[in-house]
Image (cartoon, rainbow, N blue to C red):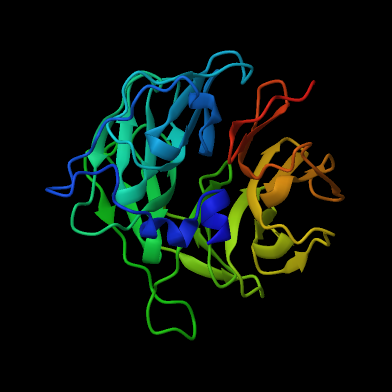
Amino acid sequence: MGYLNLCMGAALLALLPLTTLQAAGLEAVQAAPASNAAQAMMLGVTRAKERLVAVGDHGMVLLSDDQGHSFRQASSVPVSTPLTSVSFADSNQGWAVGQWGAILATVDGGETWQTQRLSSDEDRPLFAVHFFNSREGVAVGLWSLVLTTDDGGKTWMEQRLQPPEGYSRADLNLISLFADPHGTLYTSAERGQVLRSDDKGKTWRYLDTGYEGSLWAGAVLADGSLLVGGQRGTLLHSSADGNTWRRVPLKSKSSITAITTSGTNVVVGGLDGLLVESHDNGGTFEEQRTADGVSITAALFTSGDVPLLMSSRGVLPMASP
């Protein structure tokens, strides 16, 4: 349960108690205003053109219009359960996902949100969402749950996965989504699996990394190669086709929870303040830790190429450019 207690909790998020949905009918309760909103555990962050948008525990949505130097809480969010990931198609249209299979949408840059989907029959949380444009998007989650939309989230269709080789069913937890500039989409998963889709989430094929643990984060580097990270300091770098993988040696055994890139700059974050940086597109890495050892849960480069770090204790102070 350590990863659940410190950051996202991926496969165990479904075990969170029902405290913020009413038992009768599972009616959603709106996120409450909080004076300490920027100190809530944040699990996802993205860019909506110039605005930065972060989501996290208790239905928290934070907005920044000064590239991460300050954040304010969104004015209206219809759930108070954890939100795990957020994606924007432009400056106004965005989507967030989380516990109870929730999918929320905004058309005003994250100021206000509406519910597109909320599952009342089972709690299969969604862990990641990615939109290619204002109409086509993908969300993934517990037990190989894959949802796609072609109409901006008005309708969501479940896509059934084939089981990985050697298994009788597809029941992996799909934990992150990341894409290349051409629209090829990847999700990192349990059992060392990375899945690839060339048709915007409709069908997938498995890329076996040779690793057997869970992979919690990933990114496509500037040269098209893949970088994924997971349990016990596991960081794997592959060729662009995903057929050949090598392990990046790290001294730390802290699990990796976030990877972000900007050009040839790469930042990898993890539990216990793990912070790994590369300035040559993953050729070499420098390993360090945050000052107070707080666990990093999400990361994003600002427009000034300064890494913005989210943590189990909220937004971390930004480093100087």
185 w.r.t. 215: above or below? above
The residue located at (32%, 66%) in the rendering is: 160
178 w.r.t. 292: above or below? below
Q: Residue 88 appears at what percent x and percent y?
A: 44, 31
Q: Nearer the viewer, residue 41 or 175?
A: 41
Q: Nearer the viewer, residue 132 or 147?
A: 147
Q: Nearer the viewer, residue 140 or 71?
A: 71
Using the rendered image of the protein, determine whether residue 238 is visible from the camera's viewpoint: no
Q: How many numbered dots are placed on residues in this image?
A: 0
Q: Residue 263 appears at what percent x and percent y?
A: 73, 35
Q: Residue 40 appears at what percent x and percent y?
A: 51, 33
308 w.r.t. 245: above or below? above
Which quadrant would the C terminus be assigned to in this image? top right
Q: Quadrant of residue 254?
A: bottom right
Q: Kindly give the residue lying farthest to the top in the view shown.
A: 66
Q: Nearer the viewer, residue 6 or 281?
A: 6
The residue located at (73%, 26%) in the rendering is: 306
Report the side of 213 relative to 232 (left or right). left
